Image (cartoon, rainbow, N blue to C red):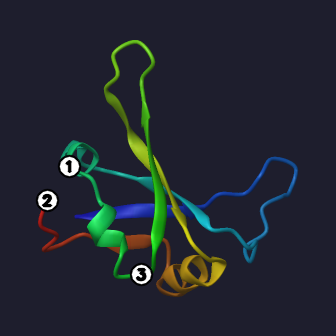
Amino acid sequence: EQVEIKRTIPKGSGQLKDFKTTKIFVDELENSFVNYGLENFFFKYGKAVEHQIIRDHETNHSRGFRFVIFDNEEVVDEMFTKGNMIDMAGTQL
């Protein structure tokens, strides 16, 4: 299983490939990743200081994606050196 990650870029900043940020968007393909959390998974990249699971306001069910905020920009830069897909194979949930 793979999940797609994207840099979060504030509106009006354009689509700068090398934009510095501590926050990533994670498109979770399977609902099990949303329900059980990925906090421990992301620690192998660096210190994740916040996770925001985006939920439907009416049903409170996950909308299938989250934001992860790291303690520094270098962690995010390193994650993207291998592309924008993260392999979740073998992740224990």
* Residue under label 2: 93
Q: Earlier in the sequence, mark 1 or mark 2?
A: 1
Q: What residue do we see at 48% from left, 56% from top?
A: 50
| Most distant residue in the top direction | 58
Mark 1 sits on what residue? 36
- Disc 3/disc 1 C-alpha distance (Å): 19 Å
Residue 48 lies left or right of residue 60; in this view the side is right
- Between 87 and 62, the residue placed more toward the observer is 62
Q: Do the residues labelled 1 and 2 touch (CB within 8 Å)?
A: yes
The secondary element bearing badge 2 is classed as: loop
**Residue at the (35%, 61%) spot, across then down:** 3
Image coords of residue 12 (percent x, y): 87, 49
Instruction: Using the image, tell me which numbered label, if any, was put on residue 45.
Output: 3
Q: In this rendering, would 58 be left or right of 34?
A: right
Residue at x 47%, y 85% (from the top left corner): 82
Q: Nearer the viewer, residue 67 or 50?
A: 50
**What is the x, y in percent for residue 53?**
41, 42
Left-right relation of 30 to 46: left
Between the residue at mark 1 and the residue at mark 2, the CA separation in whole angstroms equals 6 Å
Vertical position of residue 63 compared to residue 80: above or below: above
Indicate the quadrant where residue 76 lies: bottom right
Query: Left of 21 or right of it: where is 57?
Result: left
Query: Callout 2 environment at 10 Å: few (<14), some (14 to 19), or many (20+)?
Result: few
